[in-house]
Amino acid sequence: MMNKNLEDGEAIGSKWLSKAIETAQKKVEARNYDIRKQVVEYDNVMNDQRKVIYEQRGEIIDSETVDEVMMAMRAETVNAIVADACPPGSYPEQWNIEQMKERVANILDLHPPIDDWMQEDAVDPEIFEERIQQMADAVAAEKAAQVDQETWRSIEKSVLIQTLDHHWKEHLSTLDALRQAVFLRAYAQKQPINEYKQEAFALFERMLSNIREDITRTIARLELRMDEPEPMPLPDLPDFLTTHLDPFTGEDNSGDIDAGELGVIANTLPPMQIPRPDLPEGENPYAALEISRNAPCPCGSGRKYKHCHGAI
């Protein structure tokens, strides 16, 4: 209808068309704004957790000692082990003692007499927690005493930083996967962003618990071995070529003399070169021999043949 009476190059002008375009633009902009708003809300959840992790990581790097952090993590780990096996308000008959012994052996590398403790009159989870904590602290103090304080502090820092980075990277991958699948919660009449916040918070708490357990397990199972430094091997030196030239024939007869005889001969020689014998000028007694020009002169002067008798 609009193209009926229009010429080429003439603009289309219509209030109805302009209103339709304006309405479509508002819908598109509103949709894009909602998308950007959701992206910011999802990123804020991750940023809040990132601030917590980076703050803890910075404190670990800047602090001179992390003994208090390690003790706190060890105490929280022992508390979680005992609390899982002995729920609050339960009777001793309902406690999962086998699970407690298994986790204590796996995480703390300890084998406390829990069965004997169960036979005591006053049986309480707090007593178990206190005794296991004392045993774990004693083992950690014994390992720290094997090396100097500076080395032990660097070991603790290294374990803390590496474990924290490993679990944080895995947590980021889990949040990305959760973000891709949380939109399906909308089919159950649930708000995806609220579900994402709840799931991300639960995953963050689980990550912190796993970090404490892994660090405690690593320190408990750490074995320090102070090996003695091995002596540096000597470089392979080439075998020295020992020759013995007969002064009369110019032949090498070093194979006929053993090392002992060579040592005796070397010790009996005076510390100087053998003087060149006085020969008539222009006479070379070795002219008939096939001697190389660069070979030592058979006369024993120590010079090359070409600079001695070979020059005649």
Image (cartoon, grey):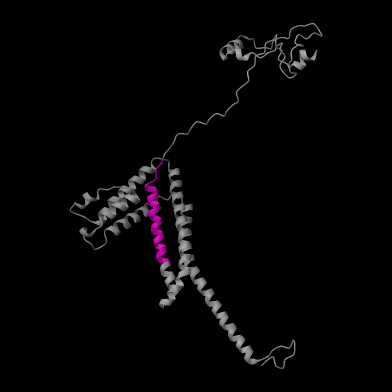
Look at the image and tell me in which quarter the N terminus lies.
bottom right
Left or right: 83 with respect to 278? left
| Residue range (magenta) | 200-224
Secondary structure mostly seen in the magenta stretch:
helix
Residue 207: give x, y in percent of width and height.
41, 60
> Where is residue 255 drawn, in percent x and y?
61, 15
Question: Does 257 sit above or below residue 120?
Answer: above
Residue depicted at 25% across the width and 48% down the height: 113
Q: Vertical placement of 40 versus 310: above or below?
A: below
Q: Measured from the top left, where is residue 237 in percent x and y?
A: 59, 26
**Which of the 4 image quarters holds residue 278?**
top right
Queried whether the magenta region covers residue 205, the answer comes back as yes
Residue 51 visible to the viewer:
no
Q: Is residue 123 magenta?
A: no
Measured along the vertical axis of the image, is residue 283 above or below residue 67? above
- Among the 4 quarters of the image, the one containing residue 204: bottom left
